[in-house]
Image: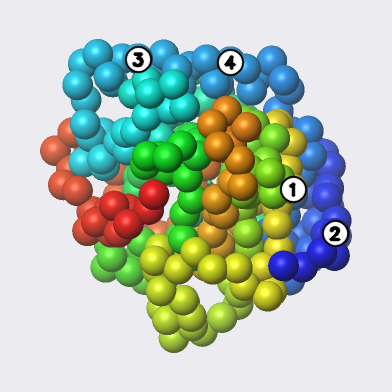
Amino acid sequence: MSKVPYPKFTLGGSLTGDQQTFFEKNGFIHFQGVASPEEVALIIQSTEQIQKRWLTEGTRKINGVPIKFGHDENGKEIVHRFPFTSQFSEPVHSFVTSSRVRSLMVLLPEGARIAENEKDGVIVNHYVNTPDSNFRQMGWHTDSMRDIFYGKKVLPMLNVGLYLDDSSSDKGGLRIIPGTHRQNMFSMLFKKAYFMNNEEDKNEMLVDAKAGDMVVHDGRIWHRVAMSPHMGAASRRRVMYVPIILGKYMPKSDESSTPFYHHFQKLVR
Ligand SMILES: O=C(O)CCC(=O)C(=O)O
Ligand SMILES: [Fe+2]
């Protein structure tokens, strides 16, 4: 793993030239302290309310996208992966539509939009490492692979991560291979076995983030989430992802069918 620290940035009213150049070269960019502790607390609270509601009502899917369930360190049933969160949470919706997220549009060609009701919408991931955890890591993948399953052309997209917990190597953490967003299609398809491979890569870089930080990556970049060396509460890692996309508008509804790539999600534990 690369031990060289990468630069972290501060988000102003608009992205600076340096910030845009860093993103174009590396395929990711890290902004510190984008959401306040109060805002993060409200978002977490609202996901707990959504979890309660989905568990009580027995909801299994939102707009055709399966909710991933599991158990926490106390054996309590929890939601590990929440799709379309902004449709159920005012604090999430207001963050997602705020100028902080909108200012990232300059990283994509004209016409990009925040996908609140397309793909899987705004996702919240909740990892916890327990002996029978259903979500403690995520193998190597690119997010753009999903476009291929939708029969769409691979267009640039951003995945905007908002950290709800501190996340460094003690949580396992996000590992990115910088620059791989510029790879050819063959490498995007076959560089690594999608979701099956959890091995460390010599060129991977650990994203070392605090709650409230925003880390943006290009959808074509190779990344994974490593397993925490700790068990239970010490391994808890919650992060929210906002997709910013291009191309044909494809909204989801209750009648939407389950996308094929979700069969891969079953490989993720
Ligand atoms: O949890 C993370 O930081 C990354 C999640 C991810 O890569 C995904 O949901 O596609
Ligand atoms: Fe991903």
In the displayed orientation, state which residue is furthest to the front: 131
Q: Secondary structure at mark 1?
A: loop
Q: CA distance from mark 4 to mark 1?
A: 23 Å
Q: Residue at x 23, y 34 (%)?
A: 61
Q: Which numbered tag is attached to residue 265?
A: none
Q: Residue at x 54, y 31 (%)?
A: 232
User: Which numbered tag is attached to residue 52?
Assistant: 3
**Depth order, front residue of 139/242:** 139
Closer to the N terminus: mark 3 or mark 2? 2
- Work out which quarter of the rendered image holds the N terminus and state it: bottom right
Q: Are marks 2 and 4 in contact (CB under 8 Å)?
A: no
Mark 3 neighbour density, 10 Å: few (under 14) some (14–19) many (20 or more): some
Secondary structure beneath dot 3 equals helix
The mark that comes first in sequence, 2 or 4, is 2
CA–CA distance in space, label 4 to label 3 = 15 Å
| Res 109 → quadrant | bottom right
Q: CA distance from mark 2 to mark 4?
A: 31 Å
Q: CA distance from mark 1 to mark 3?
A: 30 Å
**Residue 5: image tag:** 2
* Ligand 1 within 8 Å of the CB at mark 4: no
For the residues bearing labels 4 and 1, Cβ distance under 8 angstroms: no
Q: Is residue 51 above or below residue 202?
A: above
Asked if residue 153 shows in the view, the reply is yes
The residue at which mark 4 appears reads as: 42
Which amino acid, mark 3? Lys
Q: Residues within 10 Å of mark 4 (few under 14, many from 20)?
A: some
Q: Which of pointers 1 and 3 lies earlier in the amino acid sequence?
A: 3
- Residue 122 seen in the figure: no
- Residue on which the image places disc 1: 208
